[in-house]
Image: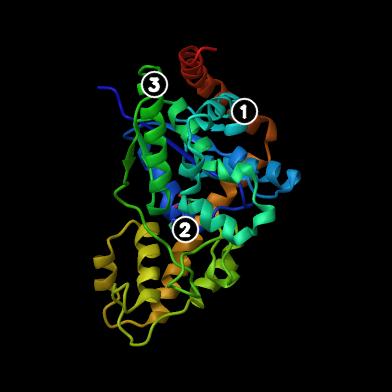
């Protein structure tokens, strides 16, 4: 039987992915290779919807590719590519923009949040049409499934609406994608402020663990994480958000159920948990960073991998675009 096809993208907006990106998204990318026909896209077109530095973008795009490969994305099994290498994304985006209502786009809550943070005079039209480009990403590959967190649900709904609208106006062309909720997805919180999600734009750098940080620095951040009152090591996200966050991270990295950890740490202190988690994290990132370095040290090979991915992606994307262009009368 044919495997369902999945498409997912990530922006190259930092030099390193952080623990939240990994445990909340990229770990599932690796796992979905077993069950899905996977298309993974480094979305550099999306990354320029806010002001950016070209040198940094180029460096971060390569760093993203190196990290994805080092984390276990297999470029033979999956199609790993950079969005700007496949011009069909921008081409289909235009067609879809012409099907999107101005008011409809204006209702996207992520746009409202992002534009409120930036101030009206700096908000670009690209930021406004960001979700339409996302729709193009998904529809070009006729993806059946798109892994989505809460914050992306509205964008996936727009994608489905646009696919349906196109199909009913011009004839069946696009597949309607379904939201895919991966089983083992973890939300990671800021180590210093466990009620806020871990984010690269976090107010507290000590609360953020980047995968490419010096492991000694990360170990120290874990050991200095904010914990809760009381002494018991138990998973209670409402009343013990700090300890619960550490347990979730530990469980994911060590691949052990939280309940097992609670049993192991019964009668022990927060210090023991943090010390062990710091070790688990160090054991995870040390070989990972070696692999990342070896990919970055061989730029010609990295370029070859990405060119191969783009070529395979284009085979699919160009067929879908040709069909869509034909349908609209081009
Ligand atoms: P950031 O919040 O640092 O800007 P992005 O918004 O670029 O990260 O997120 C990229 C991916 O990582 C998305 O799939 C997002 O849901 C996931 N992600 C980001 N932060 C976390 C987190 N703290 N916990 C779980 N998943 C996260
Ligand atoms: Na974000």
| Quadrant of the frame with the N terminus | top left
Label 1 vs label 3: CA separation?
A: 30 Å
Q: Secondary structure at mark 1?
A: helix
In the rendered structure, which disc, 1 or 2, sits on the residue that comes first in sequence?
A: 2
Which tag is nearer the camera, tag 1 or tag 3? 3
Label 2 vs label 3: CA separation?
A: 41 Å
What residue sits right under mark 1 in the picture? 85
Foreground: 12 or 35? 12
Q: Within 10 Å of the Cα at label 3, are there few (<14), some (14-19), or many (20+) other Cα atoms? A: few
The residue that appears at 51% across and 16% down in the rendered structure is 325
Task: Look at the picture and state if 133 lies above or below 245.
Answer: above
The residue that appears at 55% across and 12% down in the rendered structure is 330
In the image: residue 288, left or right of residue 153? right
Quadrant location of residue 258?
bottom left
Foreground: 47 or 69? 47
The residue that appears at 48% across and 76% down in the rendered structure is 225
Residue 48: percent from left, percent from top: 65, 43
What residue sits right under mark 3 in the picture? 169
In the image: residue 117, left or right of residue 276? right
Whether the residue carrying mark 3 lies under 8 Å from ligand 1 is answered with no
Task: Look at the picture and state if 169 lies above or below 260.
Answer: above
Task: Look at the picture and state if 172 lies above or below 143.
Answer: above
In the rendered structure, which disc, 1 or 3, sits on the residue that comes first in sequence?
A: 1
Residue 146: percent from left, percent from top: 38, 39
Task: Look at the picture and state if 241 lies above or below 170.
Answer: below
Mark 1 near mark 3, Cβ–Cβ under 8 Å? no
What residue sits right under mark 2 in the picture? 20
Label 1 vs label 2: CA separation?
A: 27 Å
């Amino acid at each position: 039987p044919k495997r369902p096809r999945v498409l997912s993208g990530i922006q190259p907006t930092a030099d390193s992915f952080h623990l939240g990106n990994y445990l909340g998204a990229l770990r599932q990318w690796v796992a979905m290779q077993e069950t899905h026909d996977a298309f993974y896209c480094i979305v550099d077109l999306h990354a320029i919807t806010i002001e950016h530095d070209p040198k940094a973008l180029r460096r971060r795009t390569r760093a993203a590719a190196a990290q994805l490969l080092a984390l276990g994305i297999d470029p033979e099994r999956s199609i790993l590519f950079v969005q700007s290498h496949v011009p069909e994304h921008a081409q289909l985006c235009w067609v879809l923009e012409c099907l999107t209502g101005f008011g409809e786009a204006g209702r996207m809550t992520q746009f409202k949040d992002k534009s409120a943070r930036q101030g009206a005079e700096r908000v670009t039209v690209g930021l406004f049409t960001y979700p339409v480009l996302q729709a193009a990403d998904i529809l070009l590959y006729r993806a059946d499934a798109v892994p989505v967190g809460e914050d992306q649900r509205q964008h996936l709904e727009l994608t489905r609406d646009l696919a349906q609208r196109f199909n009913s106006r011009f004839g069946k062309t696009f597949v309607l994608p379904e939201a895919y909720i991966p089983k083992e997805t973890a939300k990671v919180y800021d180590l210093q402020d466990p009620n806020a999600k871990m984010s690269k734009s976090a107010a507290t750098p000590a609360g953020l663990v980047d995968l490419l940080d010096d492991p000694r620095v990360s170990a120290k951040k874990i050991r200095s994480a904010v914990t809760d009152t009381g002494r018991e090591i138990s998973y209670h996200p409402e009343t013990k958000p700090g300890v619960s966050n550490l347990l979730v991270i530990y469980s994911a990295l060590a691949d052990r159920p939280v309940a097992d950890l609670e049993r192991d740490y019964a009668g022990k202190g927060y210090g023991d948990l943090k010390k062990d988690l710091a070790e688990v994290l160090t054991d995870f990132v040390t070989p990972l960073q070696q692999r990342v370095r070896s990919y970055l040290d061989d730029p010609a090979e990295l370029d070859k991998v990405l060119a191969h991915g783009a070529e395979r992606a284009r085979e699919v994307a160009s067929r879908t675009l040709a069909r869509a262009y034909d349908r609209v009368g081009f």
